[in-house]
Amino acid sequence: MTPSADTPATPEYLVVGHISKPHGTKGELFVWPLTDRPDDVFVPGRELLVGDEEGAVHEDASIVVIESVRPFKKGLLVKLEETNSREDVDTLARLYFLLPADAVPPLDEGEVFYHELLGMRVELLDGTAIGTVREVFETEPHHLLEVTGDAGKPILIPFAERIVRNVDRESRTVVIDPPEGLLDL
């Protein structure tokens, strides 16, 4: 499929982790994974780049290689090759790890990247148009789609199986079956 004005281009890099801060004195970093597949991304030997939350590569970034990873609290402790002290990693605090989009493991059947949802049409089971996905919010217990309708008023729709019945990447359509009253909020 060739990207059009309605199809967001696949970004060159995907943000896969937030580097919270250095941990200890041996060059480890405390990282919040920002991927559903941290065990596929944060592995020894994986090459990453450092950048910002928008996926832009940091101006003086070079490729970093993961030496080791271990779970810690609700995140990960990541040690990079050629870093052996806190001073070696101090400048990485509050930045992000980026993975080239072409190195991302393929999605399973029925999965979609959130950036692909942006701009998709949202319609009811009967084909009635509701609007366009403007934003995706990562909330609990379900993430939310912010949909802008014809009236311009945003509608928040839980991205839950019982409501979102189909996401068609080819036609760029999200089909929903909302409970009564959801669209009136």
Image (tube, rainbow, N blue to C red):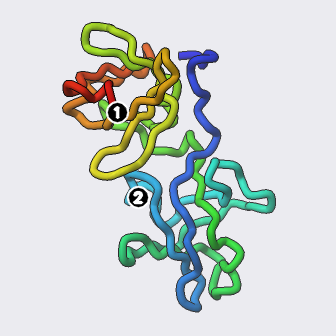
Left or right of 167 on screen, residue 29: right
Horizontal arrangement in the rendering, residue 179 relative to residue 3 (left or right):
left
Quadrant assignment for the C terminus: top left
Q: Earlier in the sequence, mark 1 or mark 2?
A: 2
Provide residue 79's location: percent of width, then percent of height. Answer: 54, 76
Residue at which label 1 appears: 157
Q: Quadrant of residue 76?
A: bottom left
Residue picked out by circle 2: 38
Question: Local crowd at mark 1 within 10 Å, few (<14), some, or many (≥20)?
Answer: many
Kindly state the secondary structure of the residue where label 2 is placed: helix
Front-most of residues 61 and 126:
126
Classify 1 as above or below 74: above
Q: Secondary structure at mark 1?
A: strand
Residue 22: percent from left, percent from top: 58, 80
Q: Residues within 10 Å of mark 2 (few under 14, many from 20)?
A: some
Q: Name the residue at 53% across, 16% down.
A: 1
Residue type marked 2: Pro
Q: Is residue 32 left or right of residue 167?
A: right
Closest to the observer, 163 or 154: 154
Query: Is 24 placed above or below 164 here?
Result: below
